Image (cartoon, rainbow, N blue to C red):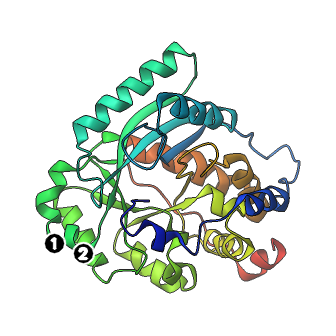
Amino acid sequence: MANQAGQSRTEGIEVDAENQTRAQQQVTSAPSTDNVPPRGGFIDLHCHVLWGLDDGPRSPEESLDLCRTLVSDGVAVVAATCHQRGVFTRNRPDTIRRRAHELAEQLSLHQIPLEIHPSAEWLLDAQTVEQLSHLVPELLTLADRQKFALVEFPFQFPTYLSYVAETLAEHGLVGVLAHVEKYHQLLTNPGRLETLLDDGFVTQMNADSIAGRHGQAVMHACRSLIQRGLIHLVASDAHSVDRRPPMWSAAWDNVLRWTDPETAELLFRTNPQSLIAGTPPHLAKRMSWLDRFRKR
C-alpha cells in the first residue's frame, strides 16, 4: 500500500503480532480426502518483494528472506510488485525491470526456486485518474504482459470506477483491483462488488485476510465473498517476513474448508496463471445458501 495516506488507510486493518498468532490458531485444515489437491505451485500476483523501491524489503537480504518464506509456503511464481504513483513517482518501468532482474540473479545464485516477473501496483487517486490516459505508458502492467493492470484506490472508495475501466480498456488493459476486502464499502456490500465486476474488473483478495490475520470479522466477510463467487484470485500482498508475511498455506486451508478443491485451484493457481498468460480469468460458481450454511 502506498505511503501516501498510508497510515490512515491502514488504521482499521493493520494488526499486531497477537492477531497474527490468533490467525494461525483459527485455521482448520481442509478435510483429508483423496480429492483434495496438494499445497504448492501457488502463483502470487501481488507481492512487494523487490528491495529499496517502496515499502517492501529494505535490502537484498530481506528480499531473499521473503523469497525463501514464499517458497516454503508453496509459492512457485511471483509477480514482483512495486508501488507506482502516490509518493512513489520515481518508480519507472525500467527501474522495476532492472531490480526484478537483479533479484532473479540473486535467486539463482542462492538456489532459491522462485520465478520472478516484474510488476507494479498503481495507486489511482483522483489526481492520477485525471491524467490516467497519458500516464498509462509510464506504468508497468501485471507481469509486464500489457494485458492486466494491478490497481488500488484510496480507502475512501471512489466514484470514478467506470471511467477507470473505460480508460484502461482504451489502452487494451483490464484492471485487477487489489485487496478488495480492505474497502469497507465492498466488504459489507456485495452488490457494489458485483457492479465492479460488471465494469470489467478482476478481483484479488489477500491471503492474510483469508487466514484471519486481520480478525474474525474480516475473515468471515472474505469467506462470504468467496462463497458468493465474487473473487477471481488470491495473492499475498506480502511486504516482509515479519511485518506483512505471505500466509499462503493458512489461506489455502481455509478456502478448501469453505468451498471445494475446484474453487481453491481456481483462485490459487488457474486464474493467476491465466493472467500471466494474458487470458481472462473465470469466477468460481456461486454456492447456494444451504451449502454456505453447511460450510460455516
Task: Kindly identify the amino acid type of the residue bearing the numbered disc 1.
Answer: Glu
Q: Are marks 2 and 1 in contact (CB under 8 Å)?
A: yes
Measured from the top left, where is residue 50 in percent x and y?
43, 37
Give the structural element (helix, strand or loop) at label 1.
Answer: helix
Q: According to the image, label 1 marks what residue?
A: 130
Q: Which is nearer the eye, 60 or 150?
A: 60
Which label belongs to residue 126?
2
Inter-mark Cα distance, 2 to 1: 6 Å
In the shown orientation, is residue 188 left or right of residue 15? Answer: left
Q: Which is nearer the eye, 71 or 204?
A: 71
* Dot 1 crowding, Cα within 10 Å, few <14, some 14–19, many 20+: few
Q: Residue at x 61, y 73 (%)?
A: 225
Examine the rendered structure and indicate whether residue 44 appears above or below residue 264: above
Examine the rendered structure and indicate whether residue 86 appears above or below residue 266: below
Measured from the top left, where is residue 70 in percent x and y?
62, 37
Task: Kindly identify the amino acid type of the residue bearing the numbered disc 2.
Answer: Ala
Measured from the top left, where is residue 47 in percent x and y?
49, 46
Q: Residue at x 25, y 70 (%)?
A: 164
Task: Determine the image quadrant of residue 290.
Answer: bottom right
Q: Residue furthest left?
A: 134
